[in-house]
Image (cartoon, rainbow, N blue to C red):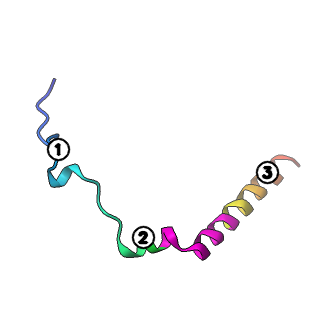
């Protein structure tokens, strides 16, 4: 095995980056979630309609 240097726990590089305030807001905003839900469903309907011609 090679020399793995950055695998010790509790180092700064070990943790993933924390989400920003805007990211947290977008994840919890019900209006944004509803918009994304509708947009994704419309994309799926278009794809299904093309495949069933």
In depth, the one of 42 and 9 nearer the eye is 9
Identify the mark at residue 9; answer none if there is no mark: 1
Q: Which of marks 3 and 2 is nearer the N terminus?
A: 2
Q: Find the residue positioned furthest to the top.
A: 1
Q: Residues within 10 Å of mark 1 (few under 14, many from 20)?
A: few
* Percent position of residue 8, x then y: 14, 41
- Magenta region includes residue 34: yes
Element at badge 1? loop
Task: Report the side of 29 relative to 24 (left or right).
Answer: right
Q: Name the residue under label 2.
A: 23
Tell me the residue that label 3 is attached to: 48
Q: In which quarter of the image is residue 16?
A: bottom left
Horizontal and vertical percent for residue 33?
Answer: 60, 69
> Regarding mark 2 in the picture, which secondary structure is present there?
helix
Q: Label 2 near label 3: C-beta < 8 Å?
A: no
How far apart are the two marked residues, 3 and 2, measured between alpha carbons? 31 Å
| Quadrant in the picture for residue 41 | bottom right
Q: Give the range drawn in magenta.
A: 26-38
| Alpha-carbon span between mark 2 and mark 1 | 26 Å
Callout in the foreground (1, 3)? 1
């Amino acid at each position: 095995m090679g020399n793995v240097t950055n695998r010790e726990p509790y180092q700064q590089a070990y943790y993933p980056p924390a989400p920003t305030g805007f990211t947290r807001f977008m994840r919890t905003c019900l209006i944004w979630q509803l918009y994304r839900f509708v947009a994704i469903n419309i994309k799926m309907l278009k794809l299904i309609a093309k495949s069933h011609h």
